[in-house]
Image (tube, grey):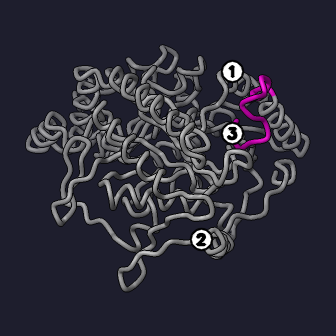
Amino acid sequence: MEGGSICSTVSSLHCDTAPLKIVRAQKQYMTDSLGVQYLDCVSNIAHVGHCHPQVVTAGKNQMATLVSAQGFVNDSLTKYVKQLISYFPDVLSVCYLVNSGSEANDLALRLARSYTNRMDVVVFDEAYHGNLGNLIDISPKMFNRMAQGKREFVHVIPYPDTYQGSYRDDDPQAAEKYVKEADRIITQATCNNRQISCFISECLIVNCGIVVPPRNYFRLLYNLIHEAGGVCIADEVQTGLGRTGEHFWAFEQYGVIPDIVTVGKPLGNGHPMAAVITTQEIADALGEYYSTFGGNPVACAIGMAVLDVIENEKLIQSAKAVGKTLLENLQILKTKHAVAGDVRGMGLCLGIEIVQDKCSRKPATELAQSIVYRLKEDHHILVQVEGPSHNVIAVTPPMCFTQLNARSLFNALDIVLSTCYQPGTVCTNIVDAQGSRSILSMEDLDSLKKENVEGPEAKRPRTSYDDID
């Protein structure tokens, strides 16, 4: 998720009707211009907590000493890179410091293409990897809604969604079948004289709705990509630095080692910094690379403070414990409420998929938006929606999120789900121009959904992945 405000990432519904103006934040709380405090379950960028005093002090002290060391020896750069690299497998030994997740993914593509001397990229359907031109080209979430469409060097494979996808959680061979789909598409590309340079993906697939792939999926898929002559890029912009609660990086959960890893905004707790980590062999293929602001002394000081806070405050262990409790409680909501179709995730990266009913699993987009709105208005809790149908409520708070916060979120969700949904009626709480609220019937909701979904930005009709490619 590159950039964006609360309004653009959470819900256009409640921002259009009741916009937030955030004026300050601390830890896992944000305060608006009216003095109302909100529990922030959105800001994975503020990784160790908003305005963490150790991070703020490190940045202020360095800014008062030396801001730029362009062209000169910078001890803080060497120290920070060494500290960051220590969290990676030994083979990933070269680090480039840049300024944003988009810049990191852009550099990762350059590295892959320079090393393989190929152009083509394999991506998940509905993936998003940044807002630069060449990243829009490899982000189906964007190019599917744009006139340019898919470029010939992009090959789209289905992401392994075992709840809504073709192969589901009751299929023990789901991983193999999804990889077989990828194999067919890559084989078709090869037959058309298209040679694969790389595959890029999140390992916990946030932008597609907090999708958790089967355990052996990435091992099989990475083998397939390597056999095709490509390299594997892990996009850890949203999932790295211990967010999953088990490991420092999400790819470790799957027992694989990517060829290139990209890390973004959480490195600086919101300060603009990012990194690309790769092997010496791949780095040698790129040649010279230079960034004026990447790895500047202020960024490095802040980056070291973030890593220290993660360790000293045991935030990974906390994410595991709090995430486990929250996941268990959300499972209770799943059994209690008909519209809570699925609950999934790891650590402090969780999703609740809102559906019209559990049998059809049909996404309930407007209801999900309504829940987000009600949580904000009635309970002062900020969440966001993810996924192609915008019906997955995503919980990605700062890592200082506590057990008490988890309980508050659970209780609020329970209340909202209990009062918002009744058979035949959805409480959308849409506020009209006069400030009054309205209850929409299912017929009204269908009409609203048609108006919203079939507008100019609607998804194109689904076809087979072979036809897409």
* Residue 441: image tag: 2
Where does label 1 land, which residue? 216
Work out which residue is located at the far bottom of the displayed protein and give it.
Answer: 434
The stretch drawn in magenta includes residue 167: yes
Q: CA distance from mark 1 to mark 3?
A: 17 Å
Q: Amino acid at mark 2?
A: Ser
Looking at the image, which residue is at 33% across and 59% down?
A: 378
Where does label 3 land, which residue? 163
Looking at the image, which residue is at 47% across and 75% down?
A: 438
Looking at the image, which residue is at 57% across and 54% down?
A: 391
Q: Which is closer to the viewer, label 1 or label 3?
A: 3
Report the number of discs: 3
The mark that comes first in sequence, 2 or 1, is 1
Work out which residue is located at the far top of the displayed protein and give it.
Answer: 90
Work out which residue is located at the far right of the displayed protein and give it.
Answer: 191
Q: Please indicate, yes or no, whether residue 282 appears anywhere in the rendered image.
A: yes
Q: CA distance from mark 3 to mark 2?
A: 27 Å
